[in-house]
Each structure stands twice: as structure tokens, then as C-alpha cells.
Image (cartoon, rainbow, N blue to C red):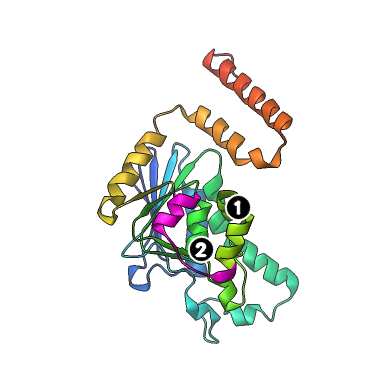
Amino acid sequence: MSLLDRDGVRVTVRDAVASVTLTRPDKRNAQTPAMWRALAAAGRLLPGDVRVVVLRGEGVSFSAGLDRRAFTPEGIDGELSFLELARAGDAEIDAAIAGFQEAFTWWRRNDLLTVAAVQGHAIGAGFQLALACDLRICADDARFAMRETSLGLVPDLGGTRPLVALVGYGRALEICATGRSVHAEEAERIGLANLVVPVADLAAATDDLAAALLAAPRDALIETKALLRDAAGHDYDEQRARERAAQARRLRDLAGLGE
């Protein structure tokens, strides 16, 4: 079933798995505000029975980052140039960036398990889109880089928190401050990638992972994801209390005593 196909984003659903595909291979899936609006819409359009979402990029690159036309005086047709946005007031700039961020937030919903299948370049906004997902499976040619600082900018699409959570503050700072590439082997070693496979095996390995994620009962995975995602914000005793409450809900549900 096709849900959406516009502005460089295609969404299809088969059984309980949704596939979100970036479809600007001739531009290495460079991102635009229109693409971000389409990605935000994708999250709103997903049927309630979708359990796993797989994010892919067509062509040789996952996403080479932001379409650089956004920084030119001419901008992107039909879009506000970032140079024009810079002249706006604080509230307008804040609202615009908040709108951009919507494309990157819904992937971490507790009712979904999201997987980025990364090949080739995942740069800047592409890196942050991969970080928006719960899991990352990478081809052995994958290259991550956060180039915003080299442009005089900061990563502002929700990528800083998951990056620090995955690799730690010191390594996250080094990756962002230098803008260097993190190759697939290093990405797996430092925790950015859950699995690295040959390019030719990426699609099959991603399908296998999606199938494995569907094996457990949905409500158990929702509770588990919520526990893990928010664990860093609670001390040990608080987290144990959250575990007890979640397990009580699961026991009652399994016994047919749920609300």
C-alpha cells in the first residue's frame, strides 16, 4: 500500500512494516524543507497497525545532507532562503526550525521501532536523520559526518542528544567539532551502527532485522522501548520503580486483567 510519494519521500506499507524512502538519488538525497514536511507527514499518516519503520535512501547515498541551494540568495524554488530567514525575528526563526525538526522527532515514538538502512554518505542532516531512528544497520561503505560546524552552524535537527547517548560526550564533540568522516567499521565499534554488512546484503539484512523486531508481542516492546529510551533521565531507584510498574502492567495484561 502506498501512503505518500512527493517531495523526495515515498512511503509504502506492507503488513506491519512501513518503508520510508528518500527518492532524490540524483542529488544524493540532499534534503529540502519540502522533504522535511513530507517526512513529518509520513509520521502522521502511518496506520496504527504499523510496528516497524525502515528508512532508506535510493541510489548510492543515504543522504548527503542539506541541499546547499538553501544557503544561496536564490534559495530553493518556493522556499524561504536561509539567508532571508536569518533576517527574521527570534520567534520566527525558532518556529521555522521547530517545523524542520518535526521530520526528525516521530521516529522515536514508543509504539514504533525504527531502523535506518544506511549506505554511502550520511552527512549533516542525513546523519541526524539516521540518528533519529532507534537502530542503524549500515553497508560497509557508509560514511557519517556532522559538517555543520564547518559551515558556521550547529546540528539543530535533533541529532545532538542521540549522538551523545550513543558515543559519549567527548567522542560526540570530537566528531562534530572536526567534521570528520566516521566509516562503517568505526561506527559499529563506537556504537553508532548496530550492524555492518556488505553493500549487496544491506536490503536483505534490513528485512531480516525488521522480521526479528516483529517477533515479540507489541505491547512488551512498547514498554521496553519506553524504559530504555528514558533510562538516562532517572536514577537507579527511580528506574527500578519504572520497571516494576511496567511489569505489573504486562502481568495484568497477560492474565487478561488489563484495563
- The amino acid marked with disc number 2 is Trp
Q: Is residue 76 visible?
A: no
Percent x, y for residue 65? 47, 69
Front residue of 85/48: it is 85
Q: Is residue 96 left or right of residue 175?
A: right
Residue at 52% across / 49% down in the picture? 107
Q: Badge 2 is on which residue?
A: 36
Dot 2, how many residues are within 10 Å of its Cα: few (below 14), some (14-19), or many (20+)?
Answer: many
- Residue furthest toward the left? 200
- From the top left corner, tell me how far across and down residue 25 is, in percent: 34, 68
Residue occupying the far bottom of the picture: 73
Asked if 102 appears above or below 257 in the picture, the reply is: below
Rounded to the nearest whole Å, what is the CA distance between mark 2 and mark 1?
28 Å
Mark number, residue 71: none
Residue tagged by mark 1?
168
Q: Over which residues does the magenta segment extend?
A: 177-193
Instruction: Tell me the mark number nearer the camera, choosing from 2 and 1.
Output: 1
Q: Quadrant of residue 243?
A: top right
The mark that comes first in sequence, 2 or 1, is 2
Position of the C terminus, as image quadrant, is top right
Q: Is residue 190 magenta?
A: yes
Callout 1, which amino acid? Answer: Gly
